[in-house]
Structure formats: C-alpha cells, structure tokens
Image (tube, rainbow, N blue to C red):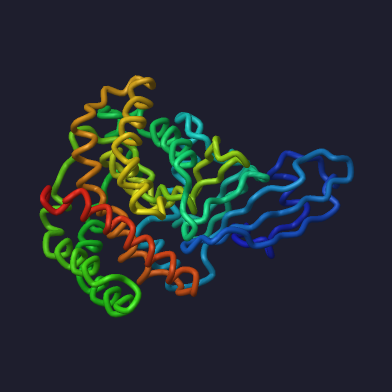
Amino acid sequence: MSTPSHPDAFTNAWLEQQLGAPAGSLAGFSAKSIGTGQMSLSFRVKLDWRGGEGPASIVAKCPSADPGTRAIAAALGSYALELGWYRELAEKIGVACPKCLHLEANADESEFVLLLQDLAPAQQGDQLAGASVAQIEAALKQAARLHAPYWGNARLDRIEWLQPRPQVDAMVRQMLAPLFAQFRERYATRIAADLLDLGGELIARTGDYFQTMPKARTIQHRDLRIDNILFSADGGTAHVVDWQTLGLGAGASDVAYLIGTSVADAEVRAQEEERLVRFYVDELRALGADADAAEVWREYRLYAFAGVIMAIIASMNVERTERGDEMFAVMFERPARQALHLDSLALI
C-alpha cells in the first residue's frame, strides 16, 4: 500500500487504524491547511468520533506539493531528518514538541506522513512581528533541553543518519555564492546596502567559516526561530516544531539564530543578548552539560551568520510567496545587524 502523503488520501479506516481506535468509531474528518512552512505542508485534521474515542483534532505533516521544493528537500535530506527525529530522538530528549502519533514513509522517504499531537490553543510565533524577551527565554529553555543531553558526547557518532554528508556540505558551499547574487538582486531595494555588503564579505570567507569547528558538538535544530515554535497564551511555554534541518554542531549557533532572527528591535536585541546567552548557559549547566560560558559567547558571536546563510539558501530554493519574500528579508537583515554589532567577521 502506498503512503497516504496528503489528507485527500486519508480514509476513516486508515485514521482509525493509525490512532488505535476501534473500527467504525470515526464518523468522518476534515482537513485544513495551517502554518507557513516552506518545505512541507501541515494540516489540522478535525475528527468526528461516534463515541468520543479519540482526539478532537490532530496535525498531519506531508511533503510539499511543489516539485522544486521536494527536489531540494531530497537533496538536503530534510524529510529524512524529521522522520529520524521522531523515530529515534524525540522521546529520548526532553524537548517540548508535539507527540508523534503515527509515522510512515516510502522507501526513499520522498513520500511520508506524520500524524502529530495538536497543541492548540498554543499559537505559532510570527517571524515578521518578532518575539518578546519572555518568548525568547521560553525558547532558550527548550534549546538547552535539546543541546544538553549530547553536549560534547561521543554518542553523537553513533547516530548514523545524523552524520554530516560531505556531498550536501559541498553542494551548499558551491551554491552559496550564486544564490547570494540572486538574493542581492531580489532584495537590492529592500535591504540596506551595508547589510548586503556584509553578506558579500561573508560569502568571500565561507571557506574559513565552514571549516570552523565547535569546542563541543551537540544536536542542533538549525532552524530555531519563532515561526517554528508554538507558544502558550502567556508566552511562558514553548513547543518546538519542524525538525527538517536537524544536524550536529555548536549549540550556540541555534541560540544566535533564534535571537538574531526573532528579535525585531535591534536595540532590544543588543541590550538583552549577553544576558540571554548567560541564561542559556545556566540552563545547560543545570541539565548537566559542561558548558564553557566564554566559549559559548564566542561561538554565539561567530554564528550570528547562521540566519544570514539560511535566508540566502532558503529564499532561493522554496516556492516563492509574498509573505515568504518579506520573511526572508527580515531573516537576513536582523542577524546581519547582529553580526555587525558583534563584529562577527573578526572571528572568521
């Protein structure tokens, strides 16, 4: 049987089976698109139970409908990474994220479906509006919970599907300069010239940048921004979603990316970031990680460029939308200002 990789292919009987419900207990269901994901599609599936046997709703995550986006996802291993997270790591690591109710995929994982716990009424963060300091603190607690268990631990080498893939790294390095040329042309009138010039300086030094190794590797989310976080009404609890960019590297990279892309006001970011990084280090240490505060701060400064690089690559490789154009513009300019403020180029 083929993988039902879109709600149009779901049936009552299939949902009953995957959710462990009695046959005939589901009267019907409806699906509505949610979220603003660029690489895949998410749907809220409302379930009409005859006897209240199951959840009122779940979330279904499926591949993109755009062939170009799916090709990029296959090249980067995006779908395989998220499937690996839910198969092997989500229940071992104490990060607040939706519970996986069912997972299946075809042999090459180009077709898949994830049935996930619906965390409503928690609300998705808004990349364009930016995050409050309280929301950043809530997200940093989850970052520490992700990073602490494997901080500098040799067990990382035994997670075969998470190991760096030389062909992907080579592809990213090779395409970064031509993609930045396209990015610069697209955003020439939207992003300040000094920030685009900084991007050009970074591109000229990418060989040295990518060769920099962290003092302590750990598991990274690599797209830890508020569009990928669901917040409680008071902003105090964060749940992390979208695990398609998972990788190994410096935990400080996730932190710099989160703060740099998600704080809309550059003055607030500059005033708060040293305290927020100390907050993160304290959380790591409380969870048992032997984190060097000075080294985490140095890596935080260096990896201010994480958001810049993500904006360049992602904007040119996913289906283009009006909101997406503006989202990638702020994803570039906020961390670019952060990098200027922190003199991040001096560390390459």
Residue 115 location, x and y as percent?
A: 62, 48
From the viewer's perspective, tell me whether residue 116 is left or right of residue 187: right
Residue 295 location, x and y as percent?
A: 19, 33
Residue at horizontal 57 percent and vertical 58 percent from the top: 35
Relative to 260, does residue 71 appear above or below in the rendering? below
Residue at horizontal 57 percent and vertical 41 percent from the top: 98
- State the residue in front, 269 or 43: 269
Residue at horizontal 35 percent and vertical 28 percent from the top: 148
The quadrant of the picture occupied by the N terminus is bottom right
Residue at horizontal 33 percent and vertical 58 percent from the top: 334
From the viewer's perspective, tell me whether residue 305 is left or right of residue 1: left
Count of picture labels = 0
Q: Could you say which quadrant of the image residue 190 lies in?
A: bottom left
Residue 304 location, x and y as percent?
A: 26, 50
From the viewer's perspective, tell me whether residue 334 is left or right of residue 132: left
Residue 336 location, x and y as percent?
A: 27, 59
Relative to 282, does residue 87 appear above or below in the rendering? below
